[in-house]
Image (spheres, rainbow, N blue to C red):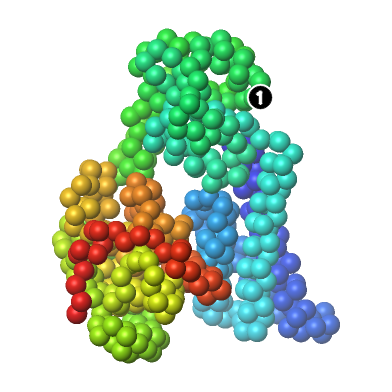
Amino acid sequence: MNDFRGLRNWILASDLGWLVVSMIVACLLRYGTASIELPRSIFLAFSVTVLGAALVWTILWSMLGLDGFGGGWRFPAIVSQLVLGTSIVMATVLAAGYLLRIYVSRLLAGYFAFLMVFGFILIRIAAHSMLTMRYRAGAVRRVVIVGSGPVAQEAAAKIQRHPEALCAVVGFLAVRDSTLEVLPIGATQNSINVRTCGIMDLLAQQKVDELIFAAAWNGNPEVAELIDQSVKRGLAVSVIPQPYELYLTSPELIDLDGLPILRLRHSVWTSSEPIWKRVLDLALGTALLIPSLPVIVAAVVLLRVKKGQAFCQEKRCGKGGRPFWMYRLNSPRRETDLPIYERIMQHLSITELPQLLNVLRGDMSLVGPRPEVLESVRHYTDWHLHRLNVKPGITGLAQVHGLRDQNALEDKTRYDLQYILRRSLFHDISLLLQTIWTIFRRFGHVPKPSESETVQQNASTSSMPI
């Protein structure tokens, strides 16, 4: 963790240094060699602009985690967040300059903003490259997770998504009644029962640096012996508290005279929608619907000619469990042997464009968990039901990570709850930009019939043509 704090500080220092470089280069691009002879008042305006930009960027960087590794390394997320952050910086600085009568050239401001984003992206790519080189050189902590349940699997997935942790999971130790079982990465069977002495030898052979306990051992003497032996041999030992509910708590570490206590504060779930979210839905929903109309009309004409029905509606579960009819174009989901025009429409999400009407009606939001069919909701656990505390959305955190209807509900719920806990105007716009990025990337590839998934019964039985 100390390495990660050092990396964060390095990224912030590089960002602030790049702000100065960006302004110098922007001046040269705008004024050329004549920039040397500019009046002192203009240089003062440039200096104040840079200082203001540095102050605003530092605040945003601290509040929003703009180091590039929050939520795991994902290039589309990094670009969208940096573009949004830079836009906020420029809007704030230019507004303050107008009020203080400190003016800069609009062309220079454009150069400055572009260079800022370009440099910020390069700084994060450089940081990621440094981490990659350290991984390839083997300068990482080799970790074994004690446990094999959902929490252990989630811990392994998070470590894999965060290269800045400089950890590599090399295996699992499954806790049984009286023994421990060695499970290599990806193994679900053929485990090996090993006593503590044998495990310590195996850990030494694998050059393991740390054990992360992600399972309740309930007084298991083998686990107690494993902890004792690990500490004696210099292995780091970390503990994930039990019980632990993913994404439903805000942990706080308390040191009570050497007694570590981890307080799990349950997040407060509110049923009221933020005002900014409805304003965003109405404004962007309308703005997206207008340019989408020609595409929708063309698809409607084609479907009417080919199939006789252009639209269908599916009964889905909305906020608070309230059912509503979700609109889409009449092309069955994940059916095999679809004609190429339907495969293209589904691949580019054109079939989902009518859901903009659901957004304007208030049944859905632009960003949120994807709405499920009623039959699936009837089998929800209390953990899954938290997805219904907000309006469903056209896109969401799970979707920009590549999860679709055919993916496991558990995986989608983890991302959906993570989104609900940290939703904000900045986050929503970032997810919308990432969605646009994802759709544009699909233009270069048309799925073949063999790539279509089988039809899910619950998705087909709940729809009807209009």
> In x, y percent, where is residue 27?
74, 78
* Residue at mark 1: 207
Q: Which residue is found at the position 64% from the left and 24% from the top?
A: 206
- Judge left or right: residue 59 versus residue 130: left
Number of dots carrying numbers = 1
Residue type indicated by callout 1: Lys
**Relative depth, front residue between 270 and 360:** 360
**Relative depth, front residue between 197 and 114:** 197
Figure check: 30 above or below 140: below
Q: Which residue is found at the position 40% from the left and 26% from the top?
A: 215
> In x, y percent, where is residue 252?
40, 35
Element type at mark 1: loop
Figure check: 228 above or below 212: above
- Judge left or right: residue 447 versus residue 310: right
**Relative depth, front residue between 44 and 208:** 208
Residue 224 falls in image quadrant:
top left
Neighbour tally class for label 1: few under 14, some 14-19, many 20 plus, Cα within 10 Å: some
Q: Which residue is found at the position 65% from the left and 84% from the top?
A: 107
Figure check: 39 above or below 168: below
| Observer able to see residue 45 | no
Q: Which residue is found at the position 40% from the left and 35% from the top?
A: 151
Figure check: 86 above or below 144: below
> In x, y percent, where is residue 174?
44, 24
